[in-house]
Image (tube, grey):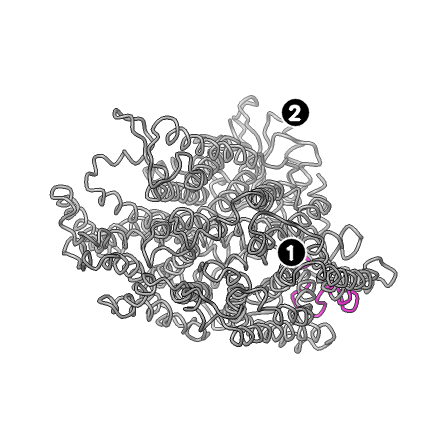
Amino acid sequence: MATPRVSAVEHEANLSDPLSGRAPLLLGDRSLHGITKAVCRPVECVPSRAWTLFFVVSVAMMGLYVLTTAYLFYEGIGIWGVNNPVNWGWAISNFVFWVGISHAGTLISAVLYLFRQKWRTSINRFAEAMTIFAVVCALSYPTIHVGRVWLLHWVFPIPNQMGTWPNFRSPLLWDVFAVTIYGLVSFIFWYLGMIPDLATLRDRAKTRARKITYGIFALGWRGSTRHWKHYERAYLLLAALATPLVLSVHSIVSFDFAISQLPGWHTTIFPPYFVAGAVFSGFAMVLTLMVIARWAFKFEHIVTIRHLENMAKVILLTGMIIAYAYGMELFIAWYGQNPYESFSCANRAFGPYAWAYWIMIVCNVIAPQIFWFKRARQNVVVLFVVSILINIGMWFERFVITVTSLHRDFLPSSWGDYSPTFFDVAALVGSFGLFFTLFALFIRYLPMVAMSEVKAGLPEAKPHHGAEGGSREASATGEGA
Amino acid sequence: MSQALVDLRAEQLHLPKTSRWCKLAPVFGGLGIAGLLTALLLAGQTTLQHFLFSYLTAYLYWLSLALGGLFFVLLHFLIRANWSVSVRRMAENVTATLPLLALLALPLLLGARHIFPWAQGVVSDPVVQGKAAYLNLPFFYLRGGLYFAIWLGLAHFFYRWSLKQDRSEDAELKEHLTGQMTRFAPLGMVLYGLSQTFASFDWVMSLDPRWFSTMVGVTFFSGSVVAIMAFLAFMAAALHLSGQLRDVITLEHHHDLGKLLIGFVLFWAYIAFSQYLVYWYANIPEETSWYRHRLVGSWQVLSIVLAVGHFGVPLFFLMSRHIKRRPMALLVGAAWMLALHYIDIYWQVMPTIHRHGVHFTLLDLATFVGIGGLFLAVFFWLLRRFPLVPVGDPRLAESVAHENF
Amino acid sequence: MAEYSTNEQLPDEKLWGVLAEFSGPGDIFRACERVRDAGYTRWDSYTPYPVRNLDKAMGLSASKVPWVVFFLGILGAVGGMTLQWWASVVEYPIVYGAKPFFSWQAFVPVTFELGVLCASLAAFFGLLHFARLPQHYHPLFTSERFQGVTDDKFFIAIEAADGKFNLQETVDLLRSVGATQVEEVAG
């Protein structure tokens, strides 16, 4: 299939901001069948060489994770750089980093849905998939960090032979509930949204094996209005449930730090600030992946520059919120007149890990300011570079929070330093392998764009499109029935 | 959607001269003056400090509402919303009370010495002395002036441009004005966020100069957004019940305002609980002192009333779409939230002087009615004077035609 | 002119219903209103995406999924708090961090999470229950043309089991409301 041709006029209309009405969301072939064809193509054609290469490299990186983790189980977590006083090192930074990444998916699929942001339909499936894979990566760290992984079931409230129960007053246990439930609910939301599209793939399947496989997961979906009625209600409710859930998850992750008495961790703005940071980093990750995917799979007419620009705006907004939170922390550290708190702040900015702090400031606060300019928001290269900078900056934010607060304890005699080992690095690199492997499988076997939602969002999809005046009347009779 | 569907007749857009709405401005004006005079009379029987605290509570209530209105207007342009056009004028009218509030702030500024412990002559506490670079009267006045300069400036320009749109017949000028407001909204939001935060540090947090929390700005913000959403929902439902604007502010708008109201009620609870949980858990004396005063004796009762009334009740009451789409029910829910918002502010300010328990006096009521009466007089006077909706907004027709899921 | 394909060999008792294709959302919306007004009950419309208000045009009642979600959400939250109280106060009381055994503040996060979990599961399984899914066999899947429903085709199907069903009249009705194709479906 040829690249969908997009005329300059259409491109112009897509970037315009008409005051009445909205700019078109899709370009090129906007028929229902055209959307089906474009979305199903990557799933139905022979994988390209680029995909195979990508997949092989990802699996190799994941293999590194598997091998080093196997050694970790054999030897114990002493192979990592963690020790007194820095007992939380890269593993926890990676955990918070991946949980944060996952939040953008829910934000796009649930929150933007509730806010009737129709542009989300082109990217929500993609972002939701990212959510689930990122949660898988995130959950892998606490799992291996417990050391004795074969006793992991102790974190769940399951009766056991010793008659013990988990400590429900521990924020780490809240994490267990929050992140696993978040993963599960995200998965339900993702799968629910995908049922109609799986039915599309089933009905287009050329081979019997494909028909049966997609058929099983499509649950016998046949687009019945009686089904749509329940489906739309269930989808709306899941969106309404996922919205407070996503706020709670990163808030609970922030409680891991905030409810302690450690300077630099114990501050009340942590919950909303972590949520904003999560959305910030997650959107940056979606942007990074989307820039590559829309180019590689020729989706430029479905995921337009306008979509990327909107994401850049959300990044700017959440970037301003975390800049606000950094500022509040600094101000209150001084205003509180607590010597430990002010020392902790000064130590972050000018202590041994000052380099990490300034990377964080440059990447998270200064870099996104370029998105005040429309031309930067519409330039794919700028978007790509800044999104990568933000990914780096947000990883360093978690590193700074974790390590700088721990390495200078209240007693100078228990001060220490932290440096990662090969196995720390392998666990981070390997988690990207896990993430990209899952992603490669997703784009190969599942519809990357929510077809039925994109179709429903077309102006001509409404029953009374173009029928001026008659619409009120018709829907009134509909409601009267 | 075609313009013809919208009933934009003059009697719909302007309050009829004979309607009861038009009589409200003088009534509230009279109430306000009477309230303030009563408060002055009552002040003679009590301490100046008590009077000023009552006044501060009432003042913060109405200020938070006005600031919520400013946030609503800025947000509307920041996110290019179209549904909210037809209720925006009411929010703009709310922001137009800011000059009045600037005037009414004078007693607080003049009486700062009697309100804020850090301003009371020689401070012996070394912790508070350490904050002197921020907590000193000249800087306090300077900051107060700056906040009002920002708020008055934003309110003035956004209101003026919107009114200019109303009067204009020139489609190009209308579009230009909307574009202008959209362009200024992000910068306005940044200024708003910072000024609102430091204002709440100055006027709420520094009442107890030893105490601190990074969340105070967000807490005050969440309360003020609940207040404006409740106020707009109340007005929309009341106008509907009086037969006004039924085709312009439709049930869809009621539904959306109701959704935002319950959304921000949840946000308020989330913020309030997060701050409490972090301080409860760490249990550091200098931080828990603030909660300590609010969780003993009758203050504890009020805390429970706040948790149940400001979160539990609206959560279940406003959850159903049937409630949000029934004007009388929405009216009751919104009025409830407006009342509970007063308790929220009272709970934040008053324990500072009433250490031994809730002590609600006639003075609290008089100052509330006094400032509120004048506030509402301005609001209803503007409601009568200008069209009820921004008639010149190019997106009005879209807003009128919008439907929920 | 609507085409009509009939299967002559099909005995009457094996007839599941008739399937009519429509050309777009507007046509099917008007057609649904007419079929509804004609008094049919065992019929349905099929679309590639949820067409706005089509359920209302069909005269369907509102979905009951919200009620299931509401009550299971409450149940999950109450159950979550009870579990934590029971585990921390009754079954395994241990002093931790100088906090009381029943520290409700610390139990709020898990209570909330379990409430959301139960409500979400209720939304998903409630949908499956009310929509009677999974249902991997359905007579409509025998129709070649019906496969387009998940792509860009719009259909109405009226079942032979409907009290008002009469092959000739039903087909005539469907044609008169704008069907482009009508076919019989075996059951």
Whether residue B10 sits left or right of residue A342 in the image: it is right
Q: Amino acid at mark 1?
A: His
Disc 1 crowd rating (10 Å Cα; few below 14, some 14-19, many 20+) is some
The quarter holding residue C32 reads top right
Disc 1: which residue: B402
Is B385 part of what is drawn in magenta?
A: yes
* Marks 2/1 same chain: no
Q: Secondary structure at mark 2?
A: loop
Disc 2 target residue: C163
Q: Residue at x 32, y 38 (%)?
A: A209
| Above or below: residue B263 compared with residue C41 | below
Residue B69 location (% of width, % of height)? 63, 63
Question: Picture coordinates of residue B381 (x, y %)?
Answer: 78, 66
Span shown in magenta: B379-402
Q: Characterize the local packing of mark 2: few (<14), some (14-19) or many (20 or more) Cα atoms within 10 angstroms.
A: few
Placement of the N terminus of chain C among the 4 image quadrants: top right
Front residue of A309/B349: it is B349
Q: Are marks 2 and 1 in contact (CB under 8 Å)?
A: no
- Percent from the top left, x then y, of residue A99? 34, 51
Q: Is residue B384 magenta?
A: yes
Q: Residue at x 64, y 28 (%)?
A: C165
Residue B78 place in picture, x, y as percent = 55, 67
